Structures are given as C-alpha cells and as structure tokens.
Image (cartoon, rainbow, N blue to C red):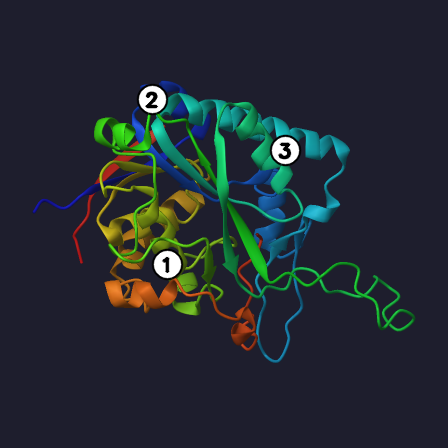
Amino acid sequence: MRAPLYRCVLGDAFEWMAARAANSIQAIVTDPPYGLKEYSDVETAKLRQGRGGVWRIPPSFDGCRRNPLPRFTVLNAAELEALRAFFVRFAAAAARILVPGGHVIVATNPLVSHCVYVPFIEAGFEKRGEIIRLVRTLRGGDRPKNAHDEFAQVSVMARSAWEPWGMLRKPCEGRVQDNLRKWGTGGLRRVASDVPFVDVIRSAPTRTRERTLAPHPSLKPQAFMRQIVRAALPLGRGVVLDPFMGAGSTLAAALAVGYASVGIERDRAYFRIAERAIPALARLSIEGSDSRNAARLDQQVTDPSRDADDERSEDRGPQARDVKARQQ
C-alpha cells in the first residue's frame, strides 16, 4: 500500500486557501493563532526571549519549568474585534474550500470561544457541539494581583480544567447518507463499529518527549490529536487541512492514522521545526491511540484531576514541499 503524502507549506494561510479549488478539502483541524496577536513578530520575539508581553511566563515551581501561555484576559475591545474579524475571514475561506458535510474542528478557549463560533455560524456552518478536552493547566485560580495576602481566600477566576474544541459542519447536500455517498463526509468516524466517538476526552498535558521533538508553546499531545483527527474523516478518506500548522501536531496525527494532510505555517522557524517533527511525532507509540482497544479506553470520561501531578502546562492555549511519509 502506498504511503500517504503530507504537504507542508511555508506561506500565508488565507492566500493558500484563496488559491485552492472550491470543495476540495474534507476536514479542517486546527489550533488557530487567535487574531495573530500572540504570534505577531513583536510578541513572538518576546516569547522567544522569555520576556512575556501577551504571553504569561509562569514561574518555576517544584523544580519544574512551566511553559508560557497567552493571557487572553489582556485583550481590549479593539483586539477582540480584530479577533472576531479574523474568524470571519477564516470561516468564509473554510466554507469555500470544504466539501459539503466537511467538519471544522477548532481549538478555542472558554474566554474567547464566542468570537470563534459566531463567525462560523454566520458563514453558514452548523455548530455540531464541542469536544471537551479534560486537562489540568495553569490558567486561572490566581489570587488578586499584588493583594495575595489581603484576599487569600479569593480567586480572580476559576482554575481551568478543560479546553473546548468547536465542531462546526458545512451543511450536507441532502441527507447525511447521501452526502456520505457523494462526498465522503457529514459525520464522524466511530472508534469501532460498536463504539461512537464521544465529545469528552481525558488528556494529559503534552509530554516532554513530544515537546523536545517539536518545541512550540501551543503543541497539543498526540494521544489527543490522533483521536480527533481520526474522527474528522468519517470514511477514512480525504485530506485534513491545518491552516495554522505550528509545529505540525495535526499533520503528525494524520500521518499516524494513515490520512493525507496539508499544513500551512507562515513563521519560518516553526515551519522548519514542523518539517523535522512531523515524521518523528508520527512514529511515537502513544498509549491510547495505537490500537482499537486502547482507543476504547481513551474514549471514557474520567477525572482530569488524575493529571494534577503532571501540570507542566502546555496551554497557551508560498514555499511548498511534498514529503513522502513512511507508514508506521
């Protein structure tokens, strides 16, 4: 059997999507940059220098160095409007290139998810629910700044223990069964014939071995990504697009489950990381994603507090090249 191809593109996602033929992508799975502020040249430079800016650089604790995460609470009204405009543009581009019944599975954040979902709905997408990733992060739970002792019993906001991934579908042509026959899309791939994909998934933070292969502040773990990428193509056919590729975790997950994929990244440093990281991440043997029985276990809803001892937080959160990938 011929190994699938994945394609990494160094360039602008919107330019690439504008040049793509209509009805030519079967699914989009992505963790977008939220209006690009946190990944602007200025903020990226601060991140790489460890100086913060919009990025919160958590202190070391118990000998563990925490990973940076973006502070969405610092966005002002103008920046929130820019965020909404970004997703208006993204939704319109996605609506054109997705086939009928194609899903967009998009990472978001409880503070700004409304800025993501409303533009997609206004563009004609159907909101099909959310995937709840149960993960303990360092977001929230802090006492009032510079008044910790005075208000020792107060948290400014709840400590986050989940991450939403929106599921939005381009309307089907007719019935779902008709759409599946014509376009191969319209539903989600089951874990097994007797096990449906469920929308709550327990997930540990991204492990050190994955971060070593793909050093990116928003890297998501393969154990989680392989589940949602696999679900995105109900018949296991088609192309998965990640227009904001980062270090390539979506493409690595697609490669691991045997899907073709395309990733776009405008930051040259992250693009180079992705080129190296995708095949390495795909080769990893990940408990809970490499067999049907393990997938059954991973699709059980369990207590996220079990990961409390592993809070090395991963929250944050054209030049083209074809790469012939070897299957596992």
Q: Which mark is residue 127?
A: none
Q: Secondary structure at mark 1?
A: helix
For badge 3, the amino acid type reads Leu
Q: Secondary structure at mark 2?
A: loop
Q: Residues within 10 Å of mark 2 (few under 14, many from 20)?
A: some
Q: Is residue 264 left or right of residue 140?
A: left
Task: Looking at the picture, tell me which residue is in the foreground, 173 or 115.
Answer: 173
Picture residue at 92% right of the left edge, 71% below the top: 150
The Cα atoms of the two marked residues, 1 and 3, are separated by 27 Å
The quadrant the C terminus occupies is bottom left
Residue 320 appears in the picture as rendered: yes
Mark positioned earlier in the residue sequence (3 or 2): 2
Q: Which mark is residue 83?
A: 3
Q: Secondary structure at mark 3?
A: helix
The residue that label 2 is drawn on is: 20
Q: Which mark is residue 222?
A: 1
